[in-house]
Amino acid sequence: QLQLVESGGGLVQPGGSLRLSCGASGFTLDHYAIGWFRQAPGKEREGVSAISANGGKINYSDSVKGRFTIPRDNAKNTVYLQMNNLKPEDTAIYYCGADRFSPYISTLHASDFGTWGQGTQVTVSS
């Protein structure tokens, strides 16, 4: 069964950092563009960042540009989301997904992604 697994969430103070990990079970990530998305209570799932299969194309939402990065290590079958200078509005459940249509782009449209993980909670609060 193809499955993504997120980890690394937690409680952090404003201005702090967290690194989320997205691993795969049953398949290798290097064939897929991977996206990170988040969903806060009462809000729709929004794209945060995405990276193409070979890492050549990366996309960030305006809300996280300059604070988050999305390194991937295909040898470890893992895509990370490095989050710095966290703000209370970053509080959400974070999900990773695999692009169903193309490994070559880095779209932030949630409808293009599937094989979602269970999510990991990130809470930014003092």
Image: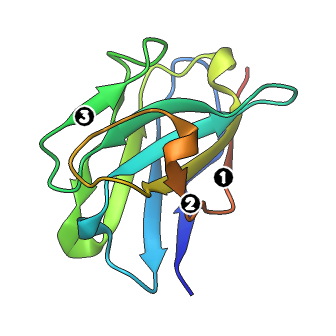
Looking at the image, do the residues carrying marks 2 and 1 touch, with CB atoms under 8 Å apart? Answer: yes
Is 57 displayed left or right of 80 in the figure?
Answer: left
Pointer 2 local density, CA inside 10 Å: few below 14, some 14–19, many at least 20: some
Foreground pick, 110 / 79 = 110
Residue 28 sits in which quadrant?
Answer: bottom left
Quick one: SS at disc 2? strand
- Using residue 9 as the reference point, say whether residue 68 is left or right of it: left
Q: Quarter-wise, where is residue 12 in the image?
A: top right
- Image spot of residue 119 (x, y percent): 66, 55
Nearer the observer: mark 3 or 2; the answer is: 3
Tell me if residue 17 comes above or below residue 8 in the rendering.
above
Helix, strand or loop under label 3: strand
Image quadrant occupied by the C terminus: top right
- The answer to whether residue 8 of the structure is visible from this angle is yes
Q: How far, Cα to Cα, is label 3 from label 1?
A: 22 Å
Residue at 87% x, 26% y: name it.
Answer: 42
Which residue type carries mark 1? Thr
User: Could you tell me the amino acid type at mark 2?
Assistant: Ser
Badge 1 element: strand
Residue placed at 52% from the left, 31% from the top?
A: 47
N-term-proximal mark, 3 vs 2: 2
Residue highlighted by disc 1: 120
x and y, in percent, of residue 118 in the image = 69, 62
Rendered view: 74 above or below 99: below
In the rendered image, which residue does mark 2 sit on? 7
The answer to whether any part of residue 123 appears in the image is no
Determine the CA span between mark 2 and mark 1.
Answer: 6 Å
- Mark 3 sits on what residue? 58
For marks 3 and 1 on the same chain, the one whose residue lies earlier in the sequence: 3
Q: x, y (%) of residue 19?
A: 44, 46
Residue placed at 68% from the left, 17% from the top? 88
